[in-house]
Amino acid sequence: MDKIAERIDLSSKVLEIDIYSPIFQEMLDNLNTEIERTIKKVYDKDFVGGEISLKLNIEIPKAFKEFPKKDEFGEMTVKTYAYRRPRFVHKVTTTLKKQFKQEGEYEAEREIKVDDDGRFIAVPVEDPQVSMFDENE
């Protein structure tokens, strides 16, 4: 599906600040690119999975702009206008997960016990039947 993008000069427009605003279009484009890339990598089995994080820093620092103007004597001067400007910095981070696995197993007919020093030990399961050949009797 082709998308048609139209360039509009936004420098003199009043812009609402929400997720649908052109202010955040680059951020949304970056996020979409990473979503598509991650889905392709996982679908192609290059990776087991992926995680995408979006970090958005929002600041509204004080700024100044100078405008030329004539004073009451007709001389050119500069008027300084103080305002608070929006500053949004975004980062889209993708972590692709590969899994490497080595497996093994130990299972035996042994009982886990605690020895006199408090360590866990695996001892053979003793036959509860008493034999007439046991030396302990």
Image (tube, helix red, strand yellow):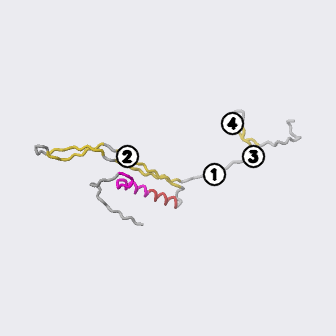
Q: What element carries label 1?
A: loop
| Residue found 85% across the figure and 36% down from its top | 136
Is disc 4 surrounded by few (<14), some (14 to 19) or many (20+) residues within 10 Å? few
Residue 50, horizontal then vertical, whole percent: 50, 54
Residue beneath disc 2: 58
Quarter of the image where one finds residue 121: top right
The quarter of the picture where the N terminus appears is bottom left
Q: Check disc 3 and give the amino acid type.
A: Glu
Whether residue 44 sits left or right of residue 78 in the image: it is: right
Which residues are drawn in magenta?
17-33
Residue 30, horizontal then vertical, whole percent: 41, 55
Residue beneath disc 1: 103
Q: Which of marks 3 and 2 is nearer the N terminus?
A: 2
Magenta stretch: residue 108 in it?
A: no
Whether residue 45 sits left or right of residue 88 in the image: it is: right
Q: Check disc 1 and give the amino acid type.
A: Glu
Residue beneath disc 3: 109
